[in-house]
């Protein structure tokens, strides 16, 4: 596939982009689909895990957040590897590790074994989105990055959809152990597709690995990087932590909904997440042509996301289902910062800047998901449910952590217009 295919301005450019999606981006989207399914699956299978292995809230938080911790620890080496070797050579073997983790998880009989399996899964899928973003940055023009990232996130986010009602239905026919065996086999299949279908990009990077590592250190020392990172990092981590586990428990314990109802609402929330990702991606692409900065669109969505969290905390009489759907829709705005951060650096740095940003996000997600479990666990469950006060305290403390990021966003004066198509 010729290098100029991605940047063609001929009438066939639309067909070229379609070919790129099928041959290059679609396989990586499958990997992101799998990673999202793994990320959120515990929100549905947790009753089986807690019943069979006797897990408390803090145990469940630690178990589920092990995915985030290993995901985070893998980010920097993956970023260097993506820029040095390309997404195909990195992503295919990583998914094999995830498949082994899922198999280990399926055979676990203790919290330790579950954490090990969950950690291997997190490590193995750690490059899924970043590999997709790297492939997108290699093959598509820069002005298409926000919309491309939105499409990657929304289509990949269908994995979260599969982890809701479809997973609940699957558990009525088989047990959670068999489900993870099937997921392991599917992950191996995606690895094979990436290895045998995705072409190599003609761009070759000759920089030494040691020099690339030094550039990562320099990146973390730059205020311009932290400026674009800090205004969304806690909100983004909250989105992943709550959506991936605590939303299901909140709907059950506070909303007093049955498991099937919880699964259906989580399904609706996932649809809202996909719709939100597409909507914010479209708005970013559309408004940037009129000089409206992508950071303004992203931050505005975050403001509404914080409002939804306030509704979860306060008993305002709204349906828990509507609050959960709003949380999912507006929380998707936080994901737009991937494209903003990636587009802020030269092409040869996109892998490292994306994974450096991801490291911060997932370390925060690990801390929040475990921390929420610890705070909720300070209360004694009654009839298997934690009291509403526990969730108010935990979610309220978490919301307070997001206020500094909101103030930073206001200090950046994002409402100021730029020249059309100017990068943030």
Image (cartoon, rainbow, N blue to C red):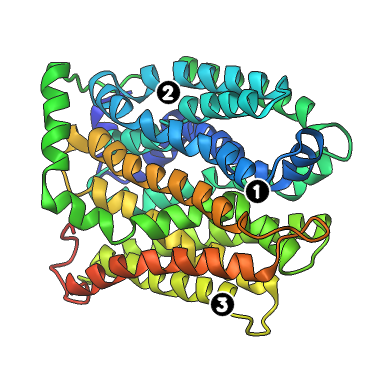
Q: Nearer the viewer, mark 2 or mark 3?
A: 3
First along the sequence among labels 1 and 3? 1
Can residue 291 be seen here? The reply is yes
Q: Position of residue 382 (x, y in %)?
A: 79, 61
Quarter-of-image position of residue 81: top left
What residue lies at 88% left-to-right and 40% top-to-bottom?
172
The quarter in which the N terminus is drawn is: top left
The quarter in which the C terminus is drawn is: bottom left
Foreground: 102 or 7? Answer: 102
Q: On the image, numbered disc 3 is attached to which residue? A: 311
Number of numbered markers: 3
The residue sitting at the bottom extreme is 316
Whether 210 is drawn above or below 391: the answer is above
Q: Nearer the viewer, mark 1 or mark 2?
A: 1
What residue lies at 58% left-to-right and 40% top-to-bottom?
64
Q: Residues within 10 Å of mark 3 (few under 14, many from 20)?
A: some
Q: Position of residue 284 (x, y in %)?
A: 33, 63
What residue lies at 68% left-to-right and 72% top-to-bottom?
320
Q: Position of residue 168 (x, y in %)?
A: 79, 45
Can residue 325 be seen here? The reply is no
Foreground: 380 or 365? Answer: 380
Q: On the image, numbered disc 2 is attached to which residue? A: 91
First along the sequence among labels 1 and 2? 1
Whether 405 is drawn above or below 179: the answer is below
Q: CA distance from mark 1 to mark 3?
A: 23 Å
């Amino acid at each position: 596939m010729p290098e100029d295919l991605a940047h063609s301005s001929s009438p066939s450019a639309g067909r070229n982009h379609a070919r790129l999606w099928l041959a290059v981006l679609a396989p990586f989207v499958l990997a992101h689909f799998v990673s999202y399914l793994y990320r959120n699956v515990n929100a549905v299978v947790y009753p089986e895990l807690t019943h069979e292995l006797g897990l408390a809230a803090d145990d469940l938080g630690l178990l589920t957040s092990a995915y985030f911790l290993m995901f985070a620890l893998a980010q920097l080496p993956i970023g260097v590897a993506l820029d040095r070797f390309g997404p195909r050579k990195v992503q295919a073997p990583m998914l094999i590790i995830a498949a082994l983790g899922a198999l280990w998880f399926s055979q676990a009989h203790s919290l330790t074994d579950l954490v090990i399996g969950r950690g291997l899964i997190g490590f193995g899928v750690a490059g899924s989105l970043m590999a997709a973003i790297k492939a997108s940055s290699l093959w598509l023009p820069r002005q298409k990055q926000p919309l491309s990232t939105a499409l990657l996130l929304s289509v990949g986010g269908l994995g979260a959809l599969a982890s809701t009602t479809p997973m609940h239905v699957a558990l009525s026919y088989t047990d959670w152990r068999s489900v993870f065996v099937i997921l392991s086999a599917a992950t191996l299949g995606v690895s094979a597709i990436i290895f045998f279908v995705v072409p190599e990009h003609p761009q070759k990077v000759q920089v030494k690995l040691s020099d690339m590592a030094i550039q990562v250190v320099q990146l973390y020392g730059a205020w311009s990087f932290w400026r674009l990172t800090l205004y969304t990092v806690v909100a983004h981590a909250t989105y992943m932590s709550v959506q991936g586990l605590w939303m299901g428990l909140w709907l059950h314990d506070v909303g007093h909904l049955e498991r099937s109802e919880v699964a259906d609402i989580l399904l609706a929330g996932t649809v809202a997440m996909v719709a939100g990702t597409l909507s914010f991606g479209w708005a970013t692409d559309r408004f940037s042509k009129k000089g409206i900065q992508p950071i303004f669109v992203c931050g505005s969505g975050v403001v509404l996301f914080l409002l939804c969290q306030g509704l979860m905390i306060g008993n305002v009489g709204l349906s828990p289902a509507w609050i959960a759907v709003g949380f999912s829709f507006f929380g998707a705005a936080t994901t737009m910062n991937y494209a903003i951060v990636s587009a802020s650096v030269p092409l040869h740095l996109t892998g490292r800047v994306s994974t450096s940003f991801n490291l911060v996000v997932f370390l925060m997600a690990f801390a929040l998901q475990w921390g929420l479990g610890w705070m909720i666990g300070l209360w004694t469950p009654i009839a298997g449910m934690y009291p509403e006060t526990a969730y108010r305290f935990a979610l309220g403390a978490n919301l307070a952590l997001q206020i500094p990021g909101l103030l930073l966003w206001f200090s950046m004066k994002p409402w100021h217009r730029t020249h059309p198509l100017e990068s943030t």
